[in-house]
Image (cartoon, rainbow, N blue to C red):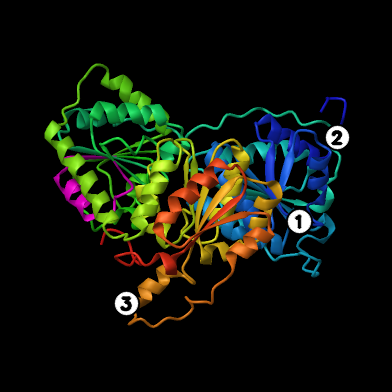
């Protein structure tokens, strides 16, 4: 837009996003955001992907952000629309996803009057503040430039998270007196506190049995080369959180991967003389904090000053942008050599083999399905995992992740978000294979988003494990509540017919041996596919899954 043309607020928002390299948003149109949509319709370089629900729109933006590393953008309506988005904002917050949620608001003259104006909600701003990292209301059109800069910086600054801006519908079309002059703020990590750098280098250099544990904070910081340097220099076994998967290739014999909750790893940690954690939160379902032993020497590196006070306490914390901290360590190390023992590495390789084999031994027929996926998925494939028996038990651990940002999961633990996140990832990278592993319970939550996949012809391969209910909770009721089932079972839903009605091809798997050829076909034919795995016919896992893994 030339300087001589005075933009509206809606147009200024689109220009700002494009200046940040963001040309896509996801949303649901409404009378309270229609001006934003109209601005996009008139813009040759900006597009909005229309979701079928506000939750779906935010989850699509989350998948787009996690795959691309850029700020995701979602557009919803006010009131019920913003409320529908709130749960998905919690997912973005749980996963440390930088996301901008633009929501409408009733006209300025009706704000906070509680007159029952259509789509009005009580304290919408408070709800959005609670569901995300921050929220603002635009009250002066001329402030839009600075507000967008603040939102962009807040969303991206570690720990990253979703932010919301609510814009009254009358202000969306308001012309600005002048075109905004934006300062091009750069998002920086939190201020570094490296007064313990010399002590940290001493710990690292003298450790004979170190363990490296890396989380999503390192991925968010783009610290791929820096983590690889530290790992190679230490020659240490490496564990990851779910969000940290792919920071290094999980095919490396010293990468234990996402097995932090397994007893064999607890025994390894008990023998370690140093734990180095980088950008990880030690979630209770990933690390069993307070139950597994942690070495007395624990060096924590994180942009969040609170990290060292999390359940796995640290003896020394370095606070700052993860890349900058690791670069400072590398500079301080210079040509010094680490002291880790070859026998320690042999011990770690044995643990890697043992935990994987123990998991495979529980799978029964699904071991063949897991092996087929591991063998056939190309290195650049993006795998999105909703919460279901099969993703929680084996897909989150046995499918090797070889690159950063290729493993996306529901970080907050809520079901029904995987399909929409896969759509966002495929929109971000139309040329790459995207596979979504979902369960029937989760798919029913956002079933309408299959329509988006079919309408756009997105070549996603949806692998649906249908066990006629909430399998994880059913297994818990079998194990801990004498088999009393309530709220976990339903009659079979004809998912193949639904998918076909939405323009999606279907391949049915009733025996484990049928899965590999079905996957090969779906990956080779670049069009929307569902691989429908009938788990009642394939059969049960050898050991039922229903609780925290590794116990």
Q: Residue at x 81, y 28 (%)?
A: 1
Q: Nearer the viewer, residue 380 or 37?
A: 380
The answer to whether residue 289 of the structure is visible from this angle is no
Mark 1 vs mark 3: in front: 3
Toward the left, the furthest residue is 343
Badge 1 local density, few (<14 within 10 Å), some, or many (20+)?
Answer: many
For label 1, the SS is strand
Whether residues under marks 1 and 3 lie with C-beta atoms below 8 angstroms apart, the answer is no
Q: Which residue is mark 1?
A: 105
Identify the disc placed on residue 480. 3
For label 2, the SS is loop
Residue 207: image x %, image y %?
A: 17, 33
Residue 6: image x %, image y %?
A: 86, 32
Q: Nearer the viewer, residue 333 or 25?
A: 25
Q: Which residue is mark 2?
A: 177
Residue 45: image x %, image y %?
A: 75, 33
Q: Which residues are magenta?
A: 256-276
144 within the magenta span = no
Q: CA distance from mark 1 to mark 3?
A: 47 Å
The answer to whether residue 220 of the structure is visible from this angle is yes
């Amino acid at each position: 837009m030339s300087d001589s043309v005075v933009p509206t607020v809606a147009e200024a928002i689109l220009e700002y996003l494009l200046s940040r390299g963001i040309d896509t948003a996801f949303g649901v149109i409404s009378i309270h955001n229609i001006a934003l949509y109209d601005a996009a319709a008139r813009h040759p370089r900006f597009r909005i992907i229309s979701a079928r629900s506000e939750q779906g729109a935010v989850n699509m933006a989350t998948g787009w952000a996690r795959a691309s590393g850029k700020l995701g953008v979602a557009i919803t309506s006010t009131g019920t629309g913003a409320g529908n988005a709130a749960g998905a904002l919690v997912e973005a917050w749980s996963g440390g996803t930088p996301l901008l949620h633009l929501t409408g608001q009733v006209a300025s003259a009706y704000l906070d009057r509680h007159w029952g104006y259509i789509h009005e909600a009580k304290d919408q701003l408070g709800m959005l503040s609670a569901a995300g990292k921050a929220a603002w209301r635009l009250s002066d059109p001329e402030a839009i430039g600075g507000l967008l800069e603040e939102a962009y910086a807040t969303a991206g600054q570690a720990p990253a998270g979703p932010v919301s801006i609510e814009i009254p519908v009358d202000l969306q079309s308001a012309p600005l007196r002048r075109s905004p002059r934006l300062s091009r703020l750069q998002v920086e990590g939190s201020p570094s506190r490296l007064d313990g750098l010399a002590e940290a280098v001493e710990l690292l250099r003298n450790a004979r049995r170190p363990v490296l544990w890396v989380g999503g904070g390192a991925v968010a910081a783009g610290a791929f080369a820096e983590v690889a340097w530290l790992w190679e220099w230490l020659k240490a076994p490496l564990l990851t959180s779910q969000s940290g998967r792919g920071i290094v290739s999980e095919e490396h014999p010293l990468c234990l991967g996402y097995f932090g909750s397994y007893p064999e790893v607890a025994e390894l940690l008990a023998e370690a003389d140093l734990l180095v954690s980088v950008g990880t939160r030690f979630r209770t379902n990933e690390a069993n904090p307070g139950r597994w032993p942690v070495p007395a020497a624990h060096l924590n590196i994180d942009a969040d000053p609170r990290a060292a006070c999390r359940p796995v306490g640290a003896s020394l914390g370095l606070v700052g942008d993860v890349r900058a901290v690791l670069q400072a360590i590398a500079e301080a190390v210079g040509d010094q050599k680490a002291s880790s023992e070859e026998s320690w590495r042999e011990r770690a390789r044995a643990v890697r083999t043992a935990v994987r084999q123990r998991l495979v031994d529980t799978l029964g027929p699904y071991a063949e399905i897991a092996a087929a996926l591991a063998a056939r998925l190309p290195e650049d494939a993006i795998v999105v995992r909703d919460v279901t028996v099969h993703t929680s038990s084996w897909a989150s651990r046995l499918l090797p992740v070889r690159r950063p940002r290729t493993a996306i999961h529901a970080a907050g633990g809520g079901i029904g978000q995987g399909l929409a996140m896969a759509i966002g990832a495929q929109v971000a990278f139309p040329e790459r294979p995207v596979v979504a592993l979902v369960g029937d319970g989760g798919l029913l939550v956002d079933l309408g988003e299959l329509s988006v996949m079919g309408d756009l012809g997105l070549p996603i391969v949806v692998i649906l494990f249908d066990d006629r209910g909430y399998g994880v909770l059913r297994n818990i009721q079998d194990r801990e509540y004498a088999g009393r089932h309530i709220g976990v079972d339903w009659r079979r839903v004809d998912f193949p017919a639904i998918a076909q009605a939405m323009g999606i091809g279907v391949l049915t798997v009733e025996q484990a041996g049928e899965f590999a050829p079905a996957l090969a076909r779906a990956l080779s034919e670049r069009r929307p596919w569902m691989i429908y795995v009938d788990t009642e016919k394939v059969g049960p896992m050898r050991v039922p899954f229903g609780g925290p893994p590794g116990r």
